Amino acid sequence: MNVLAWNCQGAASRTFRRTLKLFLQDFKPSILCLLEPKVFGDHANEICFDLSFDHWIRVEAYGFSGGIWVFWKNEIQVRISRTHPQFVLLEIMEDNTTPWNLSFVYGSPDHALRRHLFEDLSQEGLNFHGPWLIAGDYNSVLSVDEVSGSTNFSSSRCAGFRNWIFEEGLINVGFEGPQFTWCRGLSLTSFKAARLDRALCNSEWRMRFLDASVLHLPMVGSDHAPLLIRTKESQKCAGLRNFKYNVAWSTHPDFSKFIKENWNADYDLDHAKEELARKLQDWNHSSFENIFQRKRRVLARIKGVQRAIEIRPRSDLIKLSKKLQKELEKILSQEELYWFQSSREEWIATGDRNTRFYHASTAAKKTTF
């Protein structure tokens, strides 16, 4: 089972929706947690409906920050044990196995309020037992190694976090990817980074899920990296089908010029179309390239740049990271056009496009272009 936890820092933007749907498509989490969504009431309900999960629960923000949304699918059973301004406690059952406990955390940036999180989130105080996984944004670090500069570290501010981990008998699940899960600043002088997001568990959970792992995904559309928690080894995804024509080509600035230069009016219509189609395929490989390949390559570059920033922050790397994130946003927009075209359904462009709907329609019609 895959679990995705992300401090998205606002769930209303189109960038957020595109990025989230990329993660949902690629990793297919059974449980999704969004922290600090900054959306309330009816607007929040609309966004929750559009994400196409079977069930969800929302804990509204306390003051100007916070908020916890949790979504899950019918393939698992979830019982809500406790809600709190800074955490939710859930009981998870899958495939008729013994239940285990899952908490999602958003630690307040206010140090005084964050103390309540560590006081209230305890097995003894909440009277539950068994395997326990806790994931999210703690707004705390454990050591100076988890911040980008020693001047950004305060041992006294970390004491409550360290004591809570010790008293609850928790261990780090570990992670793959860059260490820092949060960064901010557009220049070397303003740049800050830290490992604010993590997954912890008790020994019972670790023994039950020996193959579990945590992946720090690239920071895209938020200052925080999403956490992908895999309770089993991931399976290789099937290859993507080839396509003949992609309406997203029209978003390329040279597309119109290419059509004008390569349409031969001296040929009959069928011959002209065949010749243009051949040249378009060549142009796709040389200039536009496959959307999915570009997406994977840009994501890999973002990951590499963010790792380099972690090792040695530089202004040019910080600017490159922001530039690559904008490039990914453009690619995700083009991918939406591709699936929209493939579905051949009349769909009103609201900015809340349902990628799962596109995939289902495409598979059902088996349409090629």
Image (spheres, grey):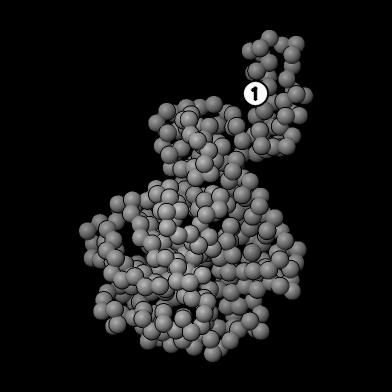
Q: Residue placed at 66% from the left, 80% from the top? A: 149
Spot occupied by residue 314 in the image (x, y as percentages of width and height): 74, 68
Residue 283 falls in which quadrant of the image?
top right
Q: Is residue 230 visible?
A: no
Closer to the camera in the image, 221 or 285: 221
Residue 16 spot, x, y in % from top left:
54, 54
Give the residue drawn at x 55%, y 36%: 338
- Say if residue 163 shows up in the picture: yes
Q: Quadrant of the C terminus?
A: top right
Q: Is residue 46 above or below residue 208?
A: above
Q: Quadrant of the N terminus?
A: bottom left
Q: Where residue 103 sits in the image (x, y, percent)?
A: 37, 70
Q: Position of residue 290 (x, y in %)?
A: 61, 39
Tell me the residue at 40%/72% (across/down): 85
| Callout 1 amino acid | Ala
Q: Which residue is mark 1?
A: 277
Neighbours of disc 1 within 10 Å: few (<14), some (14-19), many (20+):
some
Residue 7 placement, left or right of 104: right
**In the displayed structure image, the side of residue 236 where residue 190 appears, left or right:** right
Residue 122 figure quarter = bottom left
Residue at x 43%, y 47% (from the top left corner): 50
Secondary element at image label 1: helix
Please state which of residues 62 and 255 is positioned toward the viewer in this rendering. Answer: 62
Q: Nearer the viewer, residue 90 or 365?
A: 90
Give the answer, above or below, for where 164 lies relative to 344. Answer: below
